[in-house]
Amino acid sequence: MTWYFDSHIHLSDPAYLSDMEFILKGMEHLKLKACCVSMDVENSLQTLKLAKINDLVLPFIGIHPECADDNVEKMIEMIEEHHDILSGIGEIGLDPTYDNTNTRQVHVFESLLSIAEKFNKPVSIHSRKSLDNVFEIMTSYNTKHALLHWFDGSKKQLQKAMDMGFFVSFGPVMIYANDKQTLLSKTVESKILVETDGPVRFSRCFESKSGQISFIPSVIFAAAKVLEKTFDDMTNLLEKNSKSYLGI
């Protein structure tokens, strides 16, 4: 049986709460598993609860750079307590949009990278406007199971990511954005993943709708077209890559 994987979605976000029963049934119908990433300590608790309800939800807990003032010590305690049921650590990373000095973000990022390595967990990394800084920090950490989610760098930065062994993911924007399609075409095939990053909203063909996990087949179809593969071949490749990323 072939499975679809959404490598990065905020399923525990309050925006999905009222539709959760429908979403989980849809995941079962589509044969789709979701890497449910978290924003902070409170949201991580919701992720853990959701994962207990349905095993198609793959729990990632962590502190997003927007929330870097959150209690990193508490997060480390949570990871240590629940490491046996965690699929990964995330969303973690850097983003100067939220902190121009970056000092606190770097501390939180490095602290959570260290605990991820301790328990050999994959990491989902936020790197908006900070790819070069992320590259520099990650030279001290294992990138074998590290994902640069929603990759938005240059071709040169993509090559750097490939040289360092990162996975990179592409979302619904890739369906209509030529620059994302070009990046996809230049990515090592074994390092490609797909995501929705819901509940972020998408324009163009999605009419500013909030990202839904049901968008994943459309993203796969678009990727297959760019790489000149059949839909089934693309699905098989992504399943293999997702399992490699997750270490399963």
Image (spheres, rainbow, N blue to C red):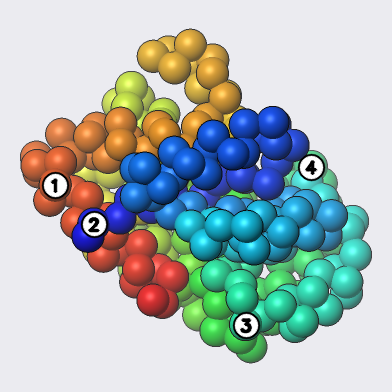
Q: Amino acid at mark 3?
A: Asp
Q: Which mark is residue 2?
A: 2
- Residue 140 in sight: no
For label 3, the SS is loop
Judge whether 116 appears above or below 172 on screen. below
Instruction: Give the labeled residue for mark 3.
Output: 84
Q: Determine the CA span between mark 1 and mark 3.
A: 33 Å
Mark 1 or mark 4: whose residue is earlier in sequence:
4
For label 1, the SS is helix
Mark 2 in CB contact with mark 1 (< 8 angstroms): yes
Mark 1 or mark 3: whose residue is earlier in sequence:
3
Mark 2 or mark 4: whose residue is earlier in sequence:
2
Q: Which mark is residue 142?
A: none
Mark 2 in CB contact with mark 3 (< 8 angstroms): no
Instruction: Give the labeled residue for mark 1.
Output: 232
Number of residues whose C-alpha sits closer than 10 Å to that of mark 3, classed few (under 14), some (14–19) or many (20 or more): few
Q: Determine the CA span between mark 2 and mark 3.
A: 25 Å
